[in-house]
Image (cartoon, rainbow, N blue to C red):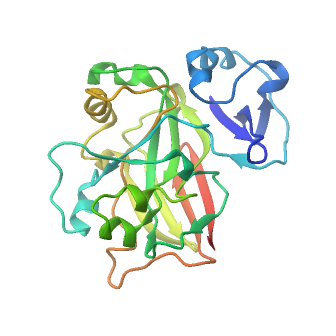
Amino acid sequence: MKLVRFGQKGKAKPGLWRDGKIVDLRKIFPEIPDINEAFFRGGWLEKVARVKDAGQKIEERIACPIHRPSKIICLGKNYAEHAKEGGFENPEKPLIFCKTPNALNGPFDPIILPKSSGQVDWEVELAVIIAKEGKRINRTDAFDYVAGFTVMNDVSGREAQFSDTQWFRGKSFDSFAPAGPVIVTVDEIGDVNNLRLTAMVDGVIMQDGNTRDMIFDIPAIIENISEDITLIPGDIISTGTPAGVGIFRDPPVVLKPGNVVECRIEKIGSIINKVVNG
């Protein structure tokens, strides 16, 4: 099953994506909430799985597939080659940081360059969407807490990230977390530990990795985070990026107005975002 949100900003509705067509879930269930904490707590994931409607062609904006999560937790240096390209050792345990929900952006909406930071960079990542509340989750039970997966670009303002004493600001500028185009549920993703992920800038491949190369896999990440941080339905965990970011190239490559960034993960799809001035 592929969950999608569609419509203009502030008016997006929940739907199912089926072979290029959209099932408008509000027409079937007028009371259905947006795809957020209430959606998962209310058992809507199971209810919409029973919908047989084939959908229809709907020419509307595709929105970020999750609405107002309580938090976006990200992994740093979770691919060995990415750590190596930055001159870092592999972390001994998951290195987590946050992006704020204002950074969430539609899969085809523009990336807005901030005024307070240069050196804006791309990072293609597999993002996990949490389905139910949990704390101190054992790794053997981790997938019981997962609703599905989506693509996220952990856009990074490197100037702010490296000049501040922490990464909060450089990771949380408006539009710095484009995600989508859909949430693919666990039953449909297949082997999540063997998915190719790529990032292209103006059609040139910059990152080309595979989720099997993550230092910490998804069960280990969920177990580590949830030890003392309660995971809430709708939360996003972005699992780190492979080698090939712009800042560590010689010379560095950074995003400029007019660039188009495409982040793709097999079995999920692509997000394509044009870079514009703020």
Residue at image position (31%, 74%) is 248
**Identity of the residue furthest to the bottom in this view:** 251
Residue at image position (64%, 51%) is 106
Along the viewing direction, whichever of 60 and 161 lies nearer the viewer? 161
The percent position of residue 206, horizontal first and vertical second, equals: 44, 69
Along the viewing direction, whichever of 144 and 229 lies nearer the viewer? 229
In the rendered view, would you say 207 is above or below 55? below
In the rendered view, would you say 251 is above or below 198? below
Q: Quadrant of the C terminus?
A: bottom right
Residue at image position (47%, 20%) is 132
> Does the rendering let one see residue 245?
no
In the rendered view, would you say 251 is above or below 164? below
Please tell me in which quadrant of the rendered image residue 261 appears.
bottom right
The percent position of residue 38, horizontal first and vertical second, equals: 60, 22
Residue at image position (68%, 37%) is 4
15 on left or right of 37:
right
254 on left or right of 43:
left
Q: How many marks?
A: 0
The percent position of residue 144, horizontal first and vertical second, equals: 41, 19
Q: Quadrant of the N terminus?
A: top right
The percent position of residue 183, horizontal first and vertical second, equals: 58, 36
In the rendered view, would you say 262 is above or below 65? below
135 on left or right of 233:
left
